[in-house]
Image (cartoon, helix red, strand yellow):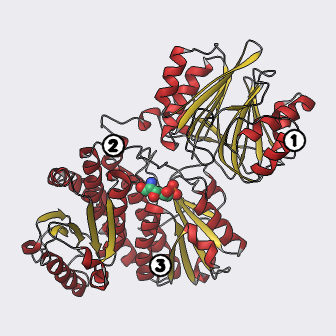
Amino acid sequence: MCGIVGYVGSRSALDVVMAGLKRLEYRGYDSAGVAVPADGGLAAAKKAGKLLNLEKELTERPLPAGTTGIGHTRWATHGAPTDDNAHPHLDNAGRVAVVHNGIIENFAVLRAELAERGHELLSETDTEVVAHLLAEEFSVTADLAEAMRLVCRRLEGAFTLVAVHADEPGVVVGARRNSPLVVGVGEGEAFLASDVAAFIAHTRSAIELGQDQVVELRRDGVTVTGFDGSVADVRSYHVDWDAAAAEKGGHDYFMLKEIAEQPKAVADTLLGRVDASGALTLDEVRIPAAELREVDKVVIVACGTAFHAGLIAKYAVEHWARIPCEVEPASEFRYRDPILGSRSLVIAVSQSGETMDTLMALRHAREQGSKVLAICNTNGSTIPRESDAVLYTHAGPEVAVASTKAFLTQLVACYLVALYLAQVRGAKWADEIRAVVRDLARMPGEVERVLETMEPVRELARSLAGKDTVLFLGRHVGHPVALEGALKLKELAYMHAEGFAAGELKHGPIALVEEDLPVVVVVPSPRGRSVLHDKIVSNIQEIRARGARTIVIAEEGDETVAPYADHLVRVPVTPVLLQPLVATVPLQVFACELATARGNEVDQPRNLAKSVTVE
Ligand code: AGP
């Protein structure tokens, strides 16, 4: 949830670290800080608030030049976002500095022990205990990497730690457990970061770190060991995102760029997944077909928008593969004592691959003997590394906190998995699968068509900027779309927004309907279950009779709904199960435009972070 950068090489460490933190600010922006070994000592600066505040501080009070350094941008967990609680944290002698992402669960005990040994702790954070422990161990080992190994063995919880010591000015040491950390390797320089976006401007050669590992960076190389000191073998990989991909591409916000990238993201996620005969070939799903044929239950675990993708996937898995499918918020999953076994296939959906709730859910599933398949957008992240198999989405970097293109690619990946299950189990004939694959291949173009007709939606959004409530209704796969539309409006416009199954309206929520209340209704295709279409038309009439302002999302040619729509948003005709790929887009644009009209920060909404790496 925080952004971390470390550097050792021949450039200005401060320049590299600050540029890297700017690329990671979406991970949290409550405070920021840097530390640089220089002139035999350690220089540090840290400020509450956004990175801009730290930049001003460094302009007014520059740090000494150095070619080694670390930096941090924070999303507060322990301790308010203040200067004292900002990272990096130092020991009392000011000889070691450390930055941290995660939660050290036994920090209270460690804090009390340190105080008894005469250490003065100046902040409310869990992180600060590490600075003092490193100082103690370094006074014995005179080796920062060894000191880090000894300290990590005493910590409980999830952590990424990166530290420097005044006595080793050419060394940066990092460690990780249940929290992201990647290594960038350049010519005579090396980088550490929470996310490759921080260093891909300098190198695309990366090393992924495994669980409970310590990495030591020097100009002339990188050494990786376990917490026990054993030398670890490392896997290098090439980062195929280029620096430009992480820029805004001419849009005002990353979110607008990412909404616009959805046709390409959907197309890229489909690439290479069908062979010449039209059969699905999901190579990275390294679970043998024979095992997939034995699966008797699918359980999807995810959070937020990814959870909504799972809700839609349920319809596809049950309709195409004829396997029972449960969908559960990852944060609830392991506490309900789920019934799992070797024939359960658990699918963990995550854009970042670092969401702690989802990671802990998949761990629980594996402990129960279930196979876990990850659907993830971030190569080398923890969730795919800890799964039995992975199907990567290819949305490219999603920087805006509000997830858009990742969501559409999660839907595509879920459709592919459901179809693949149907294929290996013979639940669908090859020609039926080819027909769905052909429909999917049309979707990038259909999404593009929706994007070209969004101006009326933007005008509508601006006209509703003064409202304080919007309801969203849907049936069948339109119900999770309604939930997703409500979530987008909540997290961007800070408005009360709620999604309902339209059939639930008369069981209570219709009491909310009053004069001029905006209600968005996602209408299912009349070509599918026509009874569903008729029922939702009745729902629209019910709310209109009570004064609601109806905003209707309906497919082209559906004239039945027109008389009851105060605002009619057309989407292309698609197969019933694929409609979310086109029906979600107007809701993303609506929320983004309304938030902009209200003057909100779109890419980094208040209280939120892009990746929630604590439970
Ligand atoms: C959605 O717009 C939010 N950013 C949030 O709900 C997000 O989808 C959720 O935190 C899951 O993140 P993940 O996909 O990285 O696991």
Circle 1 is placed at which residue position? 116
Q: Is residue 200 visible?
A: no
* Quadrant position of the C terminus in the picture: bottom right
Residue 203, placed above or below residue 9 = below
Residue 145's quadrant in the figure? top right
The x, y position of residue 427, in whole percent, is 46, 84
In this picture, residue 229 sits left or right of residue 542: right
Q: Is mark 3 within 8 Å of ligand 1?
A: no
Circle 3 is placed at which residue position? 422
Residue 90, placed above or below residue 337 = above
- Residue type at the position of mark 1: Glu
Q: Residue at x 51, y 16 (%)?
A: 59
How far separated are the C-alphas under marks 1 and 2? 53 Å
In this picture, residue 335 sits left or right of residue 591: right
Give the mark nearer the N terminus: 1 vs 2.
Answer: 1
Give the mark nearer the N terminus: 2 vs 3.
Answer: 2
How far separated are the C-alphas under marks 2 and 3? 35 Å
Foreground residue, 237 or 136? 136
- Residue type at the position of mark 2: Lys
- Residue type at the position of mark 3: Ala
Residue 125's quadrant in the figure? top right
Q: Secondary structure at mark 1?
A: helix
Foreground residue, 559 or 131? 131
Circle 2 is placed at which residue position? 257
Foreground residue, 22 or 527? 22
Residue 401, placed above or below residue 274 = above
